[in-house]
Image (cartoon, grey):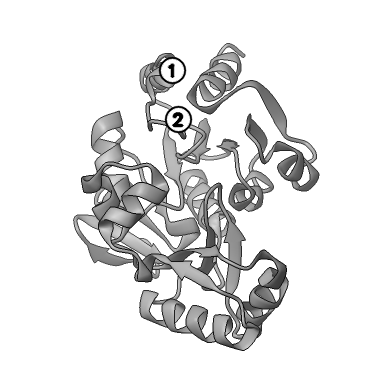
């Protein structure tokens, strides 16, 4: 059995307009073959629920850089140890509470004397402008639970800021547009947990991962077949995922290219 874990922005979704149509042939192939494809993203639960409806995805999903995984009730036949129940899902949580992250980010910025601008300082209109999103999707992006995106306004102080975050026992990563502060969690922790559940249900599985940014490096490092979707972060990502296959095309066209080739095998 194969299981696919995929990032969204810049991978399955185009960065410019969030279109996924170039990936439609591979999406349909996954459906025909009944291969689970797990959205594994920095987006919020509210955002992912929107995209699952658009894409027709009914599988578990990972939100906010591994802050939590949501598994539709009944997807697996047993109650998952450590999971809570919410919104019709079993929920596995690894992330720190959002209010704690905002407070820690503000403290780290003061200590390091590094200017930042986080989502908590932006209204919906500003998030829409910075992220190139419609207002309704920007509102979903602000419904954060486990991860705070932020911009670094003084790049020469970035090292001091990141060190101050680590000193508080928290972690950081970098996506395409934003840096992120989070608890001691990442996408890799969630991917391993879900892989183990699929193996309990189905026996040995082969995992495929697709991502385009540095915040994907962790989970690409724990899948069997890592795919690096071409982007401006490719050189840095290749340095961290040395066995990754690189697509010829960026975004959903590259996603389609890679999965279409893998499905033929």
Q: Could one spot residue 78 in this view of the protein?
A: no
Q: Residues within 10 Å of mark 1 (few under 14, many from 20)?
A: some
Residue topped by disc 2: 14
Query: Are the two marked residues, 2 and 1, in contact with CB atoms closer than 8 angstroms?
Result: yes
Query: Does 105 sit left or right of 222 as displayed?
Result: left
Circle on res. 22 = 1
- In the figure, 7 relative to 78: above or below? above
Camera-nearest residue between 156 and 93 = 156
Q: Looking at the image, which residue is at 63% across and 42% down?
A: 223
In terms of sequence position, does the residue under pointer 2 or pointer 1 come before the other?
Answer: 2
Out of 116 and 166, give the one closest to the viewer. 116
- Out of 111 and 187, give the one closest to the viewer: 111
The CA span between labels 2 and 1 is: 9 Å
Q: Quadrant of residue 164?
A: bottom right
Answer yes or no: is residue 238 visible. Answer: yes
Which is more foreground, mark 2 or mark 1? Answer: 2
Quarter of the figure with the C terminus = top right
């Amino acid at each position: 059995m194969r299981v696919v874990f995929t990032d969204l922005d810049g991978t399955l979704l185009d960065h410019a307009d969030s279109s996924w149509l170039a990936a439609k042939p591979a999406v349909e192939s996954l459906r025909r073959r009944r291969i689970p494809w797990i959205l594994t993203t920095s987006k919020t639960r509210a955002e992912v629920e929107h995209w699952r409806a658009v894409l027709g995805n009914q599988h578990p999903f990972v939100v906010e850089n591994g802050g939590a995984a949501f598994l539709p009730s009944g997807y697996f036949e047993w109650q998952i140890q450590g999971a809570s129940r919410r919104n019709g899902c079993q929920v596995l949580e690894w992330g720190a509470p959002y209010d704690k992250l905002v407070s820690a980010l503000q403290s780290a910025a003061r200590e390091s004397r590094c200017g930042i601008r986080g989502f908590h300082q932006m209204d919906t209109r500003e998030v829409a402008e910075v992220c190139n999103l419609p207002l309704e999707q920007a509102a979903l992006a602000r419904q954060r639970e486990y991860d705070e995106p932020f911009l670094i306004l003084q790049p020469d102080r970035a090292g001091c800021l990141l060190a101050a975050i680590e000193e508080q026992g928290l972690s950081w990563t970098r996506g395409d547009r934003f840096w992120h502060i989070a608890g001691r969690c990442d996408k890799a922790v969630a991917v391993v947990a879900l892989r183990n559940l699929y193996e309990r249900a189905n026996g040995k599985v082969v995992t495929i991962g697709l991502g385009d940014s540095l915040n994907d490096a962790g989970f690409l490092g724990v899948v069997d077949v890592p795919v690096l979707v071409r982007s401006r972060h490719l050189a840095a990502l290749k340095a961290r995922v040395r066995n990754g296959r690189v697509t010829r095309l960026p975004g959903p066209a590259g996603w389609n290219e890679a999965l279409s080739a893998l499905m033929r095998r």
